[in-house]
Amino acid sequence: MVVSSFVPGPQLLEELSQFFRLLSEPARLQLLCELKQGPCDVATLIESTGFSQSHISRQLGQLQRAGLVRCERDGVRLIYRVDDTLVDDLCELVQNRLRQRLQAQLAELQSV
């Protein structure tokens, strides 16, 4: 494991905090997971998530402003797609960490 000696300043800490707040909303994570399967329009996202059109549009707007999602026009439809692999990488890191913790807890319980 690489340990960094860099301590971010207040402005960078605020930026990091805002980014993680963006990803802390389950609806946005669900939309990102849906879009990882392939590009979708809002109607498809409504059908797959059960969210309202306005809720999806709000969440996609935030993801788009953060540079995680991009949108292209196809006639009258807007097609959304994931525009950054960073979310995949972060989710994989977190899932691995959670898996390690759960395996350690299970091993501890089994040793009792």
Image (spheres, rainbow, N blue to C red):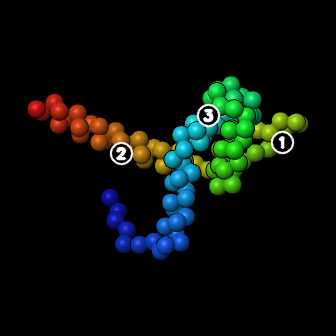
Q: Is residue 81 above or below residue 6?
A: above
Q: Which residue is mark 3?
A: 34
Left-right relation of 40 to 98: right
Q: Is residue 2 above or below residue 26?
A: below
* Image disc number at residue 44: none
Residue 45 appears at what percent x and percent y? 68, 31
Q: Which residue is mark 2?
A: 97
- Dot placed on the residue nearer the N-terminal end, 3 or 1: 3
Residue found at x 65% / y 49%: 63
Measured Cα–Cα span from mark 3 to mark 1: 19 Å
Q: Quadrant of residue 72?
A: top right
Q: Secondary structure at mark 1?
A: strand
Q: Nearer the viewer, residue 81 or 21?
A: 21
Is the residue under label 2 in contact with that under label 3 (CB below 8 Å)?
no
Q: State whether residue 62 appears in this view.
A: yes
Q: Secondary structure at mark 2?
A: helix
Q: Which residue is mark 1?
A: 73
- Dot placed on the residue nearer the N-terminal end, 3 or 2: 3
Q: Quadrant of residue 97?
A: top left
Is the residue under label 1 in contact with that under label 3 (CB below 8 Å)?
no
Measured Cα–Cα span from mark 1 to mark 2: 38 Å
- Dot placed on the residue nearer the N-terminal end, 1 or 2: 1
Q: Amino acid at mark 1?
A: Arg
Residue found at x 41% / y 41%: 95
Q: Amino acid at mark 3?
A: Glu
